[in-house]
Structure formats: C-alpha cells, structure tokens
Image (cartoon, rainbow, N blue to C red):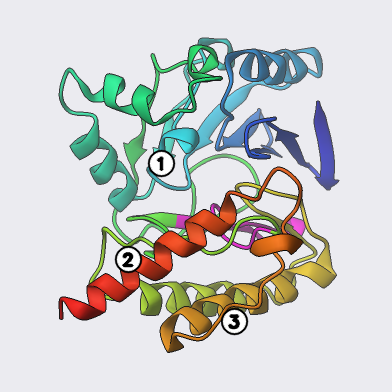
Amino acid sequence: MLKQIAEGVLVHESSFCQSNAVVVQGRDGVLLIDAGVQDHELVCLANDLSESGRTVVAGFSTHPHWDHLLWHSALGSAPRYGTAGCAAMVRARLSDAGARARVAALIPQDIVAQVPLELLGHIAGLPAGAALIPWDGPHVQIIEHQAHASGHAALLIEERGVLVAGDMLSDVLVPMLDLNGGADPIEDYLDALRLLEGAAGGVDVVVPGHGSVGGADQVRARIELDRAYVLALREGHGVDDPRVGSSAEPGWEWVSEVHDGQVQRLAQRERER
C-alpha cells in the first residue's frame, strides 16, 4: 500500500528487509525510485498507481545491488536510470549468460521464486556528473558518492523536503561499507555523510533503502549515528550502536553478523597493507 510522506511523494514498503520504493508525482506521471523486490508487491504497486490514475514515466536505481535493480512489466516500459558508475557496474556484472543465475543464488531461498529477474538491471547510465534526473516533475538532485557501492546515489527532492538515502541512514542497518571497491572505504563513507549533511538543511523526511521513514528530527540524528559507527570502525573502538547486539530490532539480529564481518575484513585489509 502506498503511504504519502510529503506532498506528491509516496512510499511502498516491501516485506523483504523493509525495502522502500519511492514514488514522486510529476506533471504527466511518476518517477519510481528502487521499485521493489517481490513479484506480488510490484504488481500491487503497479495496480495502486493505475487505480489512482498515475503512470510511471521514469525509474531510477540508487545503486547496483540486485534488490534495487528490479522491475515488473506491469509497471510499463518507462526509461530507467542510474548514475554512470552504477550502470557501468551493472553492465559488468550482468553481461554474461550466467549472471541471473548468480544473482538468484544471492537471494534468500524463501523468496527467490517471488523475485522477478527478467528485467533486472535494464537501466541507462546518466552522463557522468549528472546533477538531476531527467523528467517532467520536481527537480530531483543526484548526490553521487562511493560509500555503499560504486555509483551509489542519494536523491534530494528539495521542493518536497525529502531525502531518499539509498542504502544509508537506516534505523535498522548499520553502514555497510564497499569493502570490494575503493582503496579507502571508511573515508569514502565519511565523505558521503558530509555530502548528505550538506544537503539536509531543508529536509523534513528521510527515506532509507531499508527501514523506517524518518521525520525532520531523524535526519541529522541518523547522519550522526552513522558517522559515529564508521569512526568507531576507523579507530578500532568497540561500537555502541542500537542496531547491533541485544538492542537490535527483532528480526534484524543478523546485522550484528554484518558488523562482525566488517570488523574482520577491515582488520585483514590493515594486515595486508
């Protein structure tokens, strides 16, 4: 079910990892950001849009991870975009015949049959450094960085006071570094948080890729929480974070394993220097 979070901006939440699809109303249709995950949910979203007289005129994937690259024929054939870096990574990963089988192996087995892979990653890269999504609605500013994945983008809908954060600023997920990407994933993440902080002045609503939508009081609080976590990783201190350990939300206990894995990988990288 679509839930309005700001004027002309709605969210559709998936049962898989509280994945958030964002709908932005334009003049002649809607922009759909990170469409969703499971087949029946994508069809439900398409039906909700159709019944309200809305047509999808553009799509956008915030980054090149499988759960942000999905689509359904019921949503139509609107152009789907990503940053140049995102699209390049998608092409590299999905260029051979066995790519979809590899993606299917990454999907939890209890939902893999419900994930439509036919239109996976059919996105066009915007020109390098593109500042706005090309469509007929309110300006959607692209804030590209390398924090979570190559070509990751947050989106600022300034006139609606909404920041779509991609896989950052979650209330349930700790910052997940791109440990297979750049030479310094911690500094990449801190740089990205500075960019988001600079864009957050007039933001009233933050939408993470996974987790709960946050109000104005949560925008800076989540930036600070993510920064504290990343700085603790950099300094090798123990992490005091409500998303890790016994304070984690029910069903999200596995985030502690993600955290432990990051600590181990960072220690390994340090030893190999």
At label 2, counting other C-alpha atoms closer than 10 Å, the crowd grade (few under 14, some 14-19, many 20 or more) is: some
Type of the residue with mark 1: His
Front-lying residue, 205 or 51: 205
Q: Are marks 1 and 2 in contact (CB under 8 Å)?
A: no
Highlighted range, magenta = 153-170
Check disc 3 and give the amino acid type: Ala
Q: Which mark is residue 265?
A: 2
* Cα–Cα span, label 2 and label 3: 19 Å
The answer to whether 84 appears left or right of 31 in the picture is left
Q: Nearer the viewer, residue 72 or 18?
A: 18
The residue pinned by badge 1 equals 65
> Cβ–Cβ below 8 Å for labels 3 and 1?
no
Q: CA distance from mark 1 to mark 2?
A: 20 Å
Q: Residues within 10 Å of mark 3 (few under 14, many from 20)?
A: some
Give the crowd class for mark 1: few <14, some 14-19, many >=20 residues within 10 Å.
some
| Residue 228 - label | 3
What amino acid does circle 2 point to?
A: Arg
Q: Secondary structure at mark 2?
A: helix
Q: Position of residue 176 (x, y in %)?
A: 47, 60
Q: Nearer the viewer, mark 3 or mark 1?
A: 3
Q: Tag on residue 43?
A: none
* 1 or 2: mark nearer the eye: 2
Q: Is residue 25 above or below residue 75?
A: below
Say whether disc 1 or disc 2 marks the residue closer to the N-terminus.
Answer: 1
**253 and 196: which is toward the camera:** 253
